[in-house]
Image (cartoon, rainbow, N blue to C red):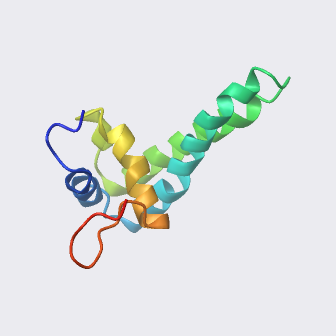
Amino acid sequence: MMGGRSWDDWIDEYAQAHQNPINKITHSIGIPMIAVSILLIPTAFFVEGFWKLPLALFVIGWVLQFVGHYFEGKPPEFFKDWRFLFIGLRWWLKKVVGFGARDSKGADNQ
């Protein structure tokens, strides 16, 4: 699935396309909103009326993504390669919680 490239290569390319500070902020908020919305969808099948929360998180998260790309002046990376849909979450995890960050010797800390 990764096309012979490492996670770090994908994340580096993703980061290069996301340099605008407003875009970084909107992605830092929107990406976890989308991820949480997807995790909450199964609950909507069991709790009446709950579907509104994951739907709202999903829609607002995507709106934030596109607002950020407006300020960046570039289309989303997943328009050129669908795998960037997964890279965005990995970028966020690395940025916020250090998941997948390299140690001082360049090795991945996973």
The residue at the point 55 percent across, 42 percent down is: 35
The residue at the point 37 percent across, 38 percent down is: 85
Left or right: 60 as drawn, with respect to 86: right
Q: Is residue 4 above or below residue 10?
A: above
Point out residue 93 in the picture as x, y percentages from the top left corner.
45, 57
**68, 44: nearer the viewer:** 44
Point out residue 18 in the picture as x, y percentages from the top left corner.
32, 58
Locate the C terminus and report the quarter of the image it occupies.
bottom left
Residue placed furthest toward the right = 48
Left or right: 11 as drawn, with respect to 32: left
Left or right: 74 as drawn, with respect to 97: left
Q: Quadrant of residue 94?
A: bottom left
Point out residue 6 in the picture as x, y percentages from the top left corner.
20, 50
Locate the N terminus and report the quarter of the image it occupies.
top left
The residue at the point 48 percent across, 65 percent down is: 96
**83, 70: nearer the viewer:** 83
Left or right: 65 as drawn, with respect to 20: right
Point out residue 3 in the picture as x, y percentages from the top left corner.
16, 36
